Image (tube, helix red, strand yellow):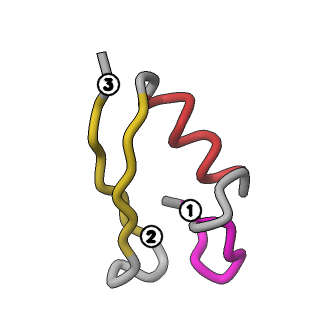
Amino acid sequence: MFYVYLIKSISHPEQKYIGQTDDLKKRLTQHNAGYSIHTENINLGNW
């Protein structure tokens, strides 16, 4: 099953990202580790 998700930066709550995945925990870990070109900006902090 696939999920559509919305995440926002903890340090910059105005920054949001919408994506889709079949593994939410793994995908959030990937965002926080910088594996997504759309959310890798170090200045945005954790998602």
Q: Quadrant of residue 16?
A: bottom left
* Image quadrant where one finds the N terminus: top left
Q: Is residue 12 left or right of residue 29?
A: left
Instruction: Tell me, for residue 2, which label it has, or none.
Output: 3
Identify which residue, 21 or 42, lies in the foreground: 21
Instruction: Tell me, for residue 9, which label it has, or none.
Output: 2
Question: Does the residue at mark 2 contact the one at mark 1 (Cβ under 8 Å)?
Answer: yes
Identify which residue, 13 or 41, lies in the foreground: 41
* Closer to the eye: label 3 or 2: 3
Question: Residue 24: percent from the left, percent from the top?
Answer: 42, 30
Task: Check the image and report above or below for 29 versus 35.
Answer: above
**Direction top: furthest residue:** 1
Q: What range is drawn magenta here?
A: 39-46
User: Circle 3: is it few (<14), some (14-19), or many (20+) Cα within 10 Å?
Assistant: few
Q: Amino acid at mark 1?
A: Asn
Q: Is residue 19 left or right of residue 26?
A: left
User: Circle 1: is it few (<14), some (14-19), or many (20+) Cα within 10 Å?
Assistant: many
Question: Residue 44: percent from the left, percent from the top?
Answer: 58, 77
